[in-house]
């Protein structure tokens, strides 16, 4: 171990990154990048209405809240690789990673000029939890991960509401900020949209994440990815552990999802029901995300044909940041008022999203064949070591 100076790149992590960003782009296109501007479908054929609903419900069932979670898990995993590579060289990476997070904050705000729903700014803020916890023991990390996943703020709100019926949690109301961004997207110029996106848009994104339990869950996923890196769980030799993960995730997903759907029938108090649903929803989506991760790991390591198919996502995953940022720029240009202002239905939007993904993928194949890093990945890496 003393002779090892660098961790080998884990290809299956790039597969999962590629899968996550692909799923994100497919979701963002049917949402019209948080614009939700759809044409009148009253005269549309029943078949197209069926396709619209099937695509919307199917994609959100499969990827809603799960693709982002995979991305967050891999963010923590990447931190471990970078931190441990430097540790083996006798360097302390923590302050350098703080600088790296500041750079990510800048990149995220550039992305936010185009798309209000971007997550890089939130990652840059929550990412400091990795610096604070990277020297803790595995046992302590597990406790912190569990606390974050159980949404401690929501548990506190439920207990307070049970003790005192008059208690009402403070509401930040992300809808106010979203309304401002929607006005700019509907009728503003490019610079008017940028001005709103960079302030109200980012406030909307961060407040929405806080209201929906994403802040605690993201912190937990960051630490979980770091712990997975420590334990080497993404390596083929440790695949057996994921069998237990898959069993537990399958066992818990259905009752958690069912309870989330039924809770409104038995609980009248909004102050109890809202935080309870955040807990149940985030946990059920976490379980589904783990099922997807297990499927990718087993498919990549255990099935030759599926492994070849999944390996096609490696170039796309290696350029995940470039792909994530550019899809927001492309999508806002297509759907917002400052661009083409395209009025497309859900099915047409999804086919367009698939087309943009394929164009990005072809570019990735070309670029990765000639360079070690994507354009934004290269800039981020070089700036990290200034």
Image: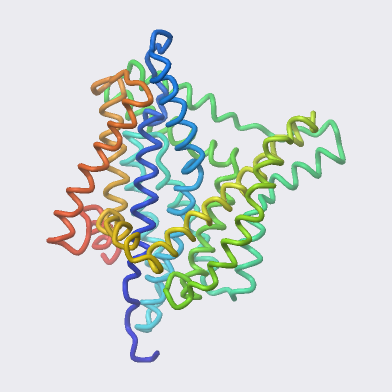
In terms of image quadrants, where is residue 171?
A: top right
Q: Quadrant of the N terminus?
A: bottom left
Q: Is residue 178 left or right of residue 246?
A: left
Coloring basis for residues: rainbow
Q: Position of residue 115 (x, y in %)?
A: 36, 34
Q: Is residue 137 left or right of residue 358?
A: right
Q: Check the image and report above or below for 118 versus 144.
A: above
Q: Quadrant of the C terminus?
A: bottom left
Q: Check the image and report above or below for 257 versus 95.
A: above
In terms of image quadrants, where is residue 90?
A: bottom left
Q: Check the image and report above or below for 216 versus 26.
A: below
Q: Is residue 63 left or right of residue 349?
A: right
Specify the farthest residue to the bottom.
Answer: 2
Point 46% across, 75% down: residue: 232
Q: Position of residue 144 (x, y in %)?
A: 63, 63
Q: Position of residue 333 (x, y in %)?
A: 26, 28
Near-viewer residue (196 or 157): 157
Q: Is residue 324 left or right of residue 271?
A: left
Point 40% across, 18% down: residue: 183
Point 44% across, 64% down: residue: 298
Specify the farthest residue to the top.
Answer: 43
Q: Position of residue 200 (x, y in %)?
A: 45, 30
Count of number-bearing discs: 0
Near-viewer residue (314 or 210): 314
């Amino acid at each position: 171990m003393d002779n090892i100076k660098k961790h080998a790149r884990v290809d299956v992590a790039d597969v999962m990154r590629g899968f996550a960003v692909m799923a994100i782009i497919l979701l963002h296109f049917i949402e019209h990048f948080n614009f939700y501007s759809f044409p009148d479908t009253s005269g549309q054929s029943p078949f197209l209405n069926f396709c619209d609903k099937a695509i919307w419900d199917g994609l959100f069932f499969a990827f809603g809240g799960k693709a982002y979670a995979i991305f967050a898990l891999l963010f923590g995993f990447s931190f471990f690789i970078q931190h441990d590579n430097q540790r083996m060289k006798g360097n302390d990476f923590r302050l350098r990673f703080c600088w790296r997070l500041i750079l990510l904050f800048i990149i995220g705000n550039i992305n936010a000029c185009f798309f209000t729903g971007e997550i890089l700014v939130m990652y840059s803020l929550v990412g400091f939890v990795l610096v604070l916890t990277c020297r803790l023991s595995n046992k302590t990390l597990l406790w912190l991960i569990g606390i974050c996943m159980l949404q401690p703020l929501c548990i506190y709100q439920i207990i307070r509401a049970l003790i005192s019926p008059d208690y009402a949690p403070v509401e930040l109301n992300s809808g106010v900020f979203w309304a401002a961004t929607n006005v700019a997207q509907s009728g503003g110029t490019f610079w008017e949209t940028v001005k709103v996106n960079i302030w109200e848009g980012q406030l909307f994104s961060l407040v929405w994440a806080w209201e929906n339990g994403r802040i605690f869950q993201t912190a937990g996923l960051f630490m979980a990815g770091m712990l997975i890196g420590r334990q080497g769980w993404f390596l083929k030799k440790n695949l057996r552990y994921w069998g237990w993960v898959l069993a537990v995730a399958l066992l818990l997903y259905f009752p958690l999802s069912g309870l989330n759907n039924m809770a409104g029938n038995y609980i009248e108090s909004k102050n109890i029901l809202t935080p309870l649903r955040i807990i149940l929803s985030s946990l059920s989506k976490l379980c589904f995300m783990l099922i997807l991760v297990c499927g990718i790991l087993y498919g990549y390591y255990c099935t030759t044909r599926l492994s070849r198919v999944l390996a096609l996502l490696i170039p796309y995953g290696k350029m995940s940041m470039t792909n994530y940022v550019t899809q927001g720029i492309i999508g806002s240009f297509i759907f917002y008022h400052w661009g083409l202002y395209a009025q497309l239905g859900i099915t047409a939007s999804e086919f367009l999203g698939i087309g943009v993904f394929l164009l990005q993928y072809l570019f990735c194949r070309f670029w990765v064949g000639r360079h070690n890093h994507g354009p934004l990945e290269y800039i981020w890496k070089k700036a990290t070591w200034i």
